[in-house]
Image (cartoon, rainbow, N blue to C red):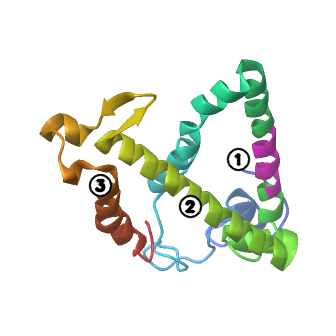
Amino acid sequence: MAVWDAAPQEEGNPGRSKHVADVEHPLLPKQQDEDGVHCEFNGASFSGAVFNLSTTIVGAGIMALPATMKVLGLILGVALIIFMAFLTDASIELLLRFSKAAKTSSYGGLMGDAFGKYGKILLQVSVLFNNIGDLIVFMIIIGDVLSGTSSSGVHHAGVLEGWFGQHWWGGRTFVLFVTTIGIFSPLACFKRIG
């Protein structure tokens, strides 16, 4: 979406103002080196960003939808989904409004510009609790799939039990311990996920 105006023009792109370029990509860093890589980070590609957003949208939250609908019922469950859609729309509108005048290109910096120091701290605490909740959901899913689960006297065999039979190393505690130490801990040590 290009908007033409009489504002000062960018070098190398006559007829297009710098202000318009900032409006089109307000949260992206403005400086690039000679290779076209952003100076603030050796960041993710467009496809990486799309994949990251997709996994966020279809992430741990979608695992809770069937249980939510079972507890609330169809009408109240659908009403809650619609309410969350309105909240999402309001938050995207807020992001777009404040990103035009943001001093930084980070989400935390944007919230700091919009709501001050306490708003930024509240955002960081919310992200922390959200990530911990997502990790718990994924650990439950991994435990159920690999080790199996029992409820109401019915046992559902996991992958390890189905392939190798019942062994001590196929138990839920051991599987989650190995998964945490062998997979999650090394992934958490990366400085940048991209």
* SS type, badge 1: loop
Residue at which label 2 appears: 132
Q: Calculate the distance from the C-alpha at mark 1 to the C-alpha at mark 3.
A: 51 Å
Residue at image coords 82%, 63%: 98
**Magenta span:** 86-94
Residue at which label 3 appears: 175
Residue type indicated by callout 1: Met
Residue at which label 1 appears: 1
Q: Is residue 88 visible?
A: yes
Locate residue 18, reporting x and y percent.
73, 68
Residue at image coords 53%, 38%: 63
**Mark nearer the N terminus (1 vs 3):** 1
**Mark nearer the N terminus (2 vs 1):** 1
Magenta residues, dominant SS class: helix
Of badges 2 and 3, the one in the foreground is 3
Residue 93: within the magenta? Answer: yes
**Number of other residues with Cα within 10 Å of mark 3, as a class: few under 14, some 14 to 19, many 20 or more:** some
**Number of other residues with Cα within 10 Å of mark 1, as a class: few under 14, some 14 to 19, many 20 or more:** few
Locate residue 109, reporting x and y percent.
73, 74
